[in-house]
Image (cartoon, rainbow, N blue to C red):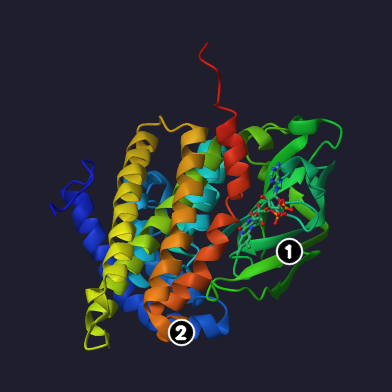
Amino acid sequence: MTPYQASWMDEELILLRDAVAKFYATEMTPHEERWQKQGHVDRDFWNKAGEAGILCASIPVEYGGSGGDFRHEAVIISEQYRASGVSGFGNHVHSQISAHYILNYGTEEQKMRWLPKMASGEMVCAIAMSEPGTGSDLLGIKTSAKKDGEEYIINGSKIFISNGQQADLIVLVTKTDPDAGSKGLSLIMVETKDLKGFRRGRNLDKIGMKSQDTSELFFDNVRVPQNFLLGEEEGRGMYQLMESLPQERLVVAIGGLGVIEKAVEDTINYTSERKAFGKSIMDFQNTRFKLAEAKTIAHIARVFVDNCTERHTAGELDSATASMAKWWVTQMQCDVVDECLQLHGGYGYMMEYPIAQMYADSRVQKIYGGTNEIMKELIARSLVPTR
Ligand SMILES: Cc1cc2nc3c(=O)[nH]c(=O)nc-3n(C[C@H](O)[C@H](O)[C@H](O)COP(=O)(O)OP(=O)(O)OC[C@H]3O[C@@H](n4cnc5c(N)ncnc54)[C@H](O)[C@@H]3O)c2cc1C
């Protein structure tokens, strides 16, 4: 089969891909098992990633980033998921999602205050939208921010927040006006160090993604300066979220694609070595057909995601197409990983085999970043009759 490569992969991106793969192989994969037991990556791994240029790759150099574009992020995400098939390191939330809220909507002062520290790993960032009472329906959030003098007073709680245990900085979705509907949401930045009234719940016990910390966060009369409102105008939160969520959805799809590719590769290797009835498992027609199907899916997903990456880099990716990438790739991820696990037999159910890890980690991809049902709702809005 002729090797395929995205037309946008140039020499510089190939060098980046190889350097990032080497970094993950030496600095991440050997620690995964320990990180899974402790429930989070080592804090100093963030600093190492910052030194290696893996954080904030598409943030301009003047704000401490590497000055790349979304293609650089795509390479970094893809290599992370391909490295071990697991996704403990919450760089997607930190670099590819939160940093872009600050870059796109922050004032100059805000960008200078937070982005360089995020790029170096001095600050770890989380984004907190979901609450115990609502996830899909963002207008239903209850966390309130009320002006008081020069400050906002914040009350409420958030749940399922990735990087929640380690976050030094949070992009917090709040309600600044409960009567203003979609114009009542605002994003407020919260610095967590020594912050009175702020509390982290326990690190939540999940089915998979054990090395990524996920937390409940509590805000009890927390005071933050008014100039921590992202941008200069209240009530812009819903617009900012809607404008930024396509990037988040594409990021999830790119991660899913990395897992599909790794699952297929690992399973080809495993079934070629394992024997039954005097021949290798790969020699059974069922195995060959299942893997032929999986490889076809991996190729279609790669071409589609690469196309979305190209369009997003050019600023042309619409919400419906990003939603298609998110739901379809993550559904395929779960289907392919399940078939690949089956081809591993009993060993596929053992956590020491990467395919078992991939199985446990993959499930959530259909839930966060907007559930796949919400993705289909968004796509359905583009179903307009032509006559
Ligand atoms: C490991 C993990 C990490 C996460 N990280 C973050 C994070 O960093 N920050 C953050 O803010 N959130 C995070 N989340 C939360 C995640 O985004 C939400 O769980 C998700 O948006 C769904 O919200 P919910 O759990 O409240 O489900 P609900 O909204 O209650 O949905 C329940 C079910 O109803 C379906 N449903 C809801 N509305 C509709 C509709 N209109 N049409 C059809 N079906 C519908 C859903 O698809 C789902 O199947 C994370 C979650 C997990 C599990």
Tag 1 or tag 2, which sits nearer the N-term? 2
Query: In the picture, which quadrant includes the N terminus?
Result: bottom left
Q: Nearer the viewer, residue 197 or 133?
A: 133
Type of amino acid at the residue the image marks with label 1: Leu
Q: Nearer the viewer, residue 280 or 68?
A: 280
Give how far across and how far down residue 143 sits, in percent.
Answer: 80, 50
Judging by the rendered image, the residue that carries numbered circle 2 is 33
For residue 305, above or below residue 87: above
Residue at image coords 47%, 48%:
328
Judging by the rendered image, the residue that carries numbered circle 1 is 217
For residue 260, above or below residue 319: below
| Number of disc labels | 2
Q: CA distance from mark 2 to mark 1?
A: 26 Å
Residue closest to the far left: 2
Give how far across and how far down residue 6 sits, in percent.
Answer: 23, 45
Type of amino acid at the residue the image marks with label 2: Glu
